[in-house]
């Protein structure tokens, strides 16, 4: 039977229609990448591969020099830049595309992110933190958005594993709604809604995929897409930049576990993951309160296509209940 569920933070409504499909094999899709076993560690035609460094301007490399493992470059087709910068309005509000858009490249061409060695995955997460700290010092920046697109349906234009960082001069509306929803929940209940969510999910158990010492992985109660997952720290921190080395090492294990599960259970689907973290505050904005927000990482497999109902109403239709998705992903 269909039902509407509301996300407790953003207040978005999701329509679950589980009779329309449920099992992974019901989703027909082309694998997001060629079989890694058929790919080489270095592809001479790939602009991201070692040996082709002259194709891209370098911001920084870890470690520096020819033996880099993670390299940061400006996006060649960047969505943000540093020209202009002033808001103006006659009738419609216009804001210049000020900010930064960086690409983080991991060296092996043929190792998907979920299968990286632990030390290389840890370096990726550490670079996320370091670049976020650097970009947060720019006076125009209000939010820093870390993403990874995997596969054509996930918006990736390159097979070579890479992530992107956007630094924007405003807080995107979706994130603003999360911060506001969390703040209002704290005002009413005196507690962090995400901390409460962790306790609820651990109590219910049916949507939990992995309960680890430092992190919980679960299918959100009102997930927008089939097999969506949330990774959340059991330690309350508003910003991803503030997690400790120990927490980062734990996140390596958890993120690899989840991405490998999706690879095997859903047959290497396209996906997006992104980190939601506290906005950068260069002014005293009341709702940017570290007590009320809790950073988390969202993973959205791209198994279906949104149609006119979703796009026209902003009510998403999900054909897989999160309880079923979690049960399937928990299985060996």
Image (cartoon, rainbow, N blue to C red):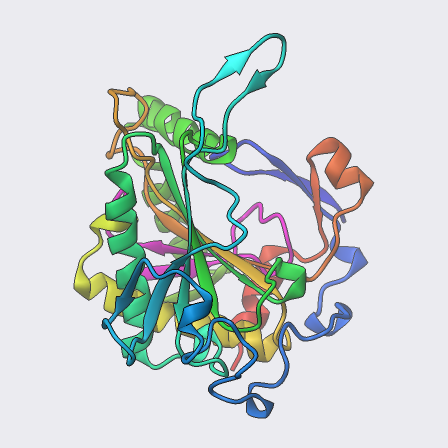
Quadrant in which residue 250 is drawn: bottom left
In the rendered image, residue 198, in percent from the top left (x then y), is placed at: 36, 50
The residue located at (50%, 27%) in the rendering is 96
The boundaries of the magenta stretch are: 214-239
The residue located at (47%, 68%) in the rendering is 55
Residue 213 seen in this snapshot: no
In the rendered image, residue 318, in percent from the top left (x then y), is placed at: 69, 51
The residue located at (54%, 58%) in the rendering is 272
Q: Is residue 233 magenta?
A: yes
Viewer-side residue, 36 vs 54: 54
In this rendering, position of residue 278 left or right of residue 44: left
Quadrant in which residue 254 is drawn: bottom left
Viewer-side residue, 50 vs 276: 50
In the rendered image, residue 168, in percent from the top left (x then y), is placed at: 42, 36
In this rendering, position of residue 291 left or right of residue 312: left
Please, is residue 33 above or below residue 284 in the view?
Answer: below
The residue located at (54%, 38%) in the rendering is 7
Can you name the residue that lies furthest to the front here? 54
In this rendering, position of residue 280 left or right of residue 307: left
In this rendering, position of residue 244 left or right of residue 6: left
In the rendered image, residue 302, in percent from the top left (x then y), is placed at: 65, 60
Most prominent secondary structure in the magenta stretch? loop
Residue 68 seen in this snapshot: yes
Please, is residue 256 above or below residue 310 in the view?
Answer: below
Viewer-side residue, 227 vs 103: 103
Please, is residue 67 above or below residue 161 in the view?
Answer: below
Q: Is residue 125 magenta?
A: no
């Amino acid at each position: 039977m269909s039902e509407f569920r509301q996300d407790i933070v953003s207040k978005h409504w999701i329509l679950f229609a589980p009779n329309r499909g449920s099992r992974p094999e019901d989703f027909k899709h082309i694998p997001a990448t060629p079989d890694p076993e058929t790919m080489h560690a270095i592809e001479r035609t790939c602009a991201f591969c070692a040996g082709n460094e002259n194709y891209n301007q370098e911001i920084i490399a870890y470690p520096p020099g020819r033996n880099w493992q993670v390299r940061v470059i400006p996006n060649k087709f960047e969505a943000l830049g540093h020209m202009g910068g002033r808001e103006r309005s006659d009738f419609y509000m216009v804001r210049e595309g000020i900010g930064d858009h960086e690409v983080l490249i991991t060296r092996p061409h043929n190792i998907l992110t979920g299968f990286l060695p632990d030390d290389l995955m840890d370096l990726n997460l550490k670079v996320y933190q370091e670049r976020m700290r650097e970009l947060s010092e720019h006076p125009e920046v209000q939010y820093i958005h870390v993403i990874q697109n995997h596969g054509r349906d996930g918006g990736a234009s390159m097979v070579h594993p890479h992530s992107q960082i956007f630094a924007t001069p405003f807080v995107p509306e979706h994130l603003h709604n999360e911060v506001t929803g969390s703040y209002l929940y704290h005002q009413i209940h005196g507690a962090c809604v995400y901390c409460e969510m962790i306790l609820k999910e651990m109590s219910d158990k049916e949507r939990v995929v992995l309960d680890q010492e430092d992190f919980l992985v679960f299918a959100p109660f009102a997930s927008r897409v089939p097999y969506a997952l949330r990774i959340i720290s059991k330690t309350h921190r508003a910003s991803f930049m503030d997690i400790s080395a120990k927490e980062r090492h734990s996140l390596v294990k958890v993120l690899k576990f989840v991405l490998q599960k999706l690879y095997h259970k859903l047959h290497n689907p396209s996906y997006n993951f992104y980190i939601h973290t506290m906005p950068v505050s260069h002014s005293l904005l009341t709702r940017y309160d570290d007590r009320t927000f809790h950073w988390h990482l969202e993973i959205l497999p791209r198994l279906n296509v949104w149609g006119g109902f979703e796009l026209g109403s902003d009510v998403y239709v999900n054909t897989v209940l999160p309880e079923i998705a979690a049960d399937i992903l928990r299985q060996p």
